[in-house]
Amino acid sequence: MFTKNLFLSALAVASLVSAQSSKVCQEDSNSINSEADIDKIASCQSLSGDVVIGEDIQHVSLDKLQSVGGNFVADNAANLVGITIPNLQTIKGEFRLQKCQSLQTISAPALTKTGKITWIALALTSFTAKISEAQSVTISDTKLTSLDGIDLKNVNRFDVNNNQYLKSVTMNLRTVTEALSMGFNAKSIAISFPALIWSNNMTITGAGSFNFPTLQHVNGSMNFLNTSVTSIACKNLTVIEQTLAFIGNDKVTELDFPILTQIGGGFKIHNNSQLVDINGFPKLKQVDGAIDFVGNFKNASLPSLEDVRGGFNLQTTEEFDCSDFSAARDDKVIKGDSFVCKSKESNPTTADGTPGADGKTNTTGTSGGNRNGGSGLVGISALLGIFITAISFVF
Ligand SMILES: *[C@@H]1O[C@H](CO)[C@@H](O)[C@H](O)[C@H]1NC(C)=O
Ligand SMILES: *[C@@H]1O[C@H](CO)[C@@H](O)[C@H](O)[C@H]1NC(C)=O
Ligand SMILES: *[C@@H]1O[C@H](CO)[C@@H](O)[C@H](O)[C@H]1NC(C)=O
Ligand SMILES: *[C@@H]1O[C@H](CO)[C@@H](O)[C@H](O)[C@H]1NC(C)=O
Ligand SMILES: *[C@@H]1O[C@H](CO)[C@@H](O)[C@H](O)[C@H]1NC(C)=O
Ligand SMILES: *[C@@H]1O[C@H](CO)[C@@H](O)[C@H](O)[C@H]1NC(C)=O
Ligand SMILES: *[C@@H]1O[C@H](CO)[C@@H](O)[C@H](O)[C@H]1NC(C)=O
């Protein structure tokens, strides 16, 4: 009797342990507002529903948890200081942290897969994770200095904006289905996607450097706005399906797109005050929209151009020879109704009438501002000459 009882209770303990070691908890939603709430799910290895962290709790620590079937969410959790989930590998839904201004640590060293990552308005400076799969990423208004811990191959949207301490992002992304948008992060941010092959809409606003050496195809538009890079190069890019724009990159001296053949929308180059020579598009054949080049450049050549379906607007503050583009219009290479080519234009404007040279003309050299002074001088000496002639005539 005694031994049998002992045996049975040993069995009971064993089965309890084994039940715990694969414990699946089936609540649709698990709200965490107190230590008692944590205790309720502390033994769960798998939660099939959501984890919703509330306003009152400071630290959420779930050591046993390995997978979450729903979302893992903290919205406006003002007192939340830390999240410790050392064994969590998967969040099937969204990993959303929003307006948690006290949050200092996310320790998720085993986390490899999530649905969406949405981290918005956090005081967070760093996190631990090794996320290699996520459908989309939105990280904005954080104090993160790096995104080490997220390294995806494919993503729908990658939207990393307004993180003023974010100084570098290197990721082995290969494809981006909807949009790659990075802007208003640290001014000097170094952006590197050394394996990127194709991406839909790409917008880079403000950056110190970027690197897309393997990019072949842009399925949407590509915009480089207000960056501080000196050179913009996409050496393996052949097609951009929509617009290509370089606007306000006031240190750029070189654009280098050696095998780009086709732009499916407009082609805009505006307000790049140090760009003297637009010669980085030697293979460009086809532009389905309009060409709109405005700035302080002295030369622009598109030697392979065969078909421009939209109009043409080129205006520069510098001396510029329009003959090649005029010939392209006469030959019906440029087919749009409007054709403007203005050399030495003191107030150059874009096709829609916006000023397109930001006034920073080259005043250190003989061009730009100084040229007017120069011609003024010529005028005066010519007048002087007449005056002297007049005087000598009188004598
Ligand atoms: C983008 O273009 C690439 C190359 O043409 C293609 O393989 C890919 O399916 C396209 N992606 C989308 C989302 O259209
Ligand atoms: C890409 O950008 C264009 C222009 O803003 C927009 O019309 C289009 O819907 C965008 N594509 C995607 C997949 O978001
Ligand atoms: C450039 O693109 C071609 C396909 O167009 C590809 O075969 C080649 O590997 C790419 N080179 C680099 C450096 O990515
Ligand atoms: C770029 O800078 C100009 C001038 O400072 C500003 O007017 C414009 O809004 C900026 N564009 C973007 C996309 O930030
Ligand atoms: C403009 O650039 C083309 C191509 O690089 C070159 O052949 C030509 O000499 C340049 N013209 C001037 C005035 O610099
Ligand atoms: C060019 O820069 C000037 C001054 O910063 C700004 O007013 C103008 O809107 C810009 N134009 C374009 C096309 O970005
Ligand atoms: C400005 O002028 C200086 C001196 O002539 C010259 O070295 C420099 O290349 C010029 N920069 C631009 C953008 O024209």
Image (tube, helix red, strand yellow):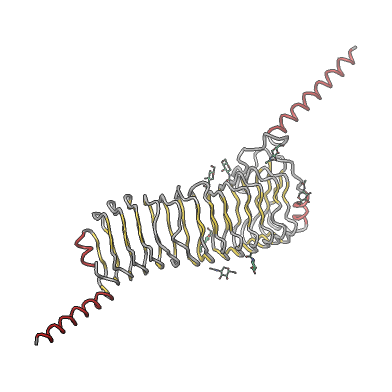
- Left or right of 209? Residue 78 is left
- x and y percent of residue 374 in the render? 74, 30
Q: Locate residue 57: give its quadrant.
A: bottom left
In the displayed orientation, state which residue is furthest to the front.
Answer: 3
Question: Between 9 and 382, which is closer to the camera in this rendering?
Answer: 9
- Of residues 367 and 10, which is closer to you in this image? 10
> Which quadrant: the C terminus?
top right
Question: With respect to residue 162, does 6 lie above or below?
Answer: below
Tell me residue 36's x, y (percent): 19, 62
Direction from residue 222 to residue 277 in the image, left or right = right
Residue at 38% of width from left, 66% of height from top? 110
The image quarter containing residue 262 is bottom right
Q: Where is residue 179 shown, x and y percent of the image?
A: 50, 61
Query: How many marks on residues?
Result: 0
Q: Residue at x 15, y 81 (%)?
A: 9
Q: Quadrant of residue 72?
A: bottom left
Residue farthest left in this picture? 1
Residue 31: percent from left, percent from top: 25, 63
Q: Nearer the viewer, residue 314 or 197?
A: 197
Please state the quadrant of the image where ligand 3 appears.
bottom right
Q: Quadrant of the N terminus?
A: bottom left
Q: Is residue 260 left or right of residue 132?
A: right
